[in-house]
Image (cartoon, rainbow, N blue to C red):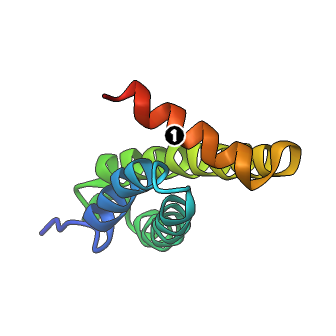
Amino acid sequence: MNQQNLPNATAVLVLGIFSIVGCCCYGIPGIIAGIVGLVLYNKDKALYMQNPAEYLNYNNLNTGRILCIIGLSLSALNILSMIVLLATGGWGAYMEKMQELQQMGR
């Protein structure tokens, strides 16, 4: 029997990594990459469940799913914290906090 790789396993893994990195960019890229990665995961998982012996890289698919969930969670927390900060202190407090963080980096 000729085994092959799942078609989207590598893409799910890359999107999972990107969703974790994207959570640092105000959360929006992380949420988009995480959702796309989870959709691709569901497609490949259905394909794998039809014939598990035919595919090789199911571990990469699961790792990508875990990374997508982590990136999605971190991005959601980032957006939620930004909303809370803007709601409680306004735009001025938000910009002040960003300047503080920039000063800490120097």
**Residue 103, horizontal then vertical, whole percent:** 42, 30
Residue where numbered disc 1 is placed: 99
Which image quarter is the C terminus in? top left
Residue drawn at x 37%, y 62% is 15
Q: Is residue 80 left or right of residue 70?
A: right
User: Which of these two is toward me, 75 or 84?
Assistant: 84
**Residue 42, horizontal then vertical, whole percent:** 53, 67
Which image quarter is the N terminus in? bottom left
Residue at the left extreme of this rendering: 2
Q: Is residue 6 left or right of residue 87?
A: left
Q: Is residue 40 left or right of residue 9?
A: right
Q: Is residue 70 left or right of residue 11?
A: right
Residue at the right extreme of this rendering: 88
Identify the secondary structure beneath mark 1. Answer: helix
Residue drawn at x 22%, y 56% is 56
Count of numbered labels shown in the rendering: 1
Amino acid at dot 1: Gln
Residue drawn at x 54%, y 56% is 26
User: Which of these two is toward me, 19 or 96?
Assistant: 96
Q: Looking at the picture, does residue 53 appear above or below residue 11? A: above
Q: Dot 1 surroundings within 10 Å: few (below 14), some, or many (20 or more)?
A: few
**Residue 81, horizontal then vertical, whole percent:** 72, 43
**Residue 101, horizontal then vertical, whole percent:** 49, 33
User: Which of these two is toward me, 30 or 35?
Assistant: 30
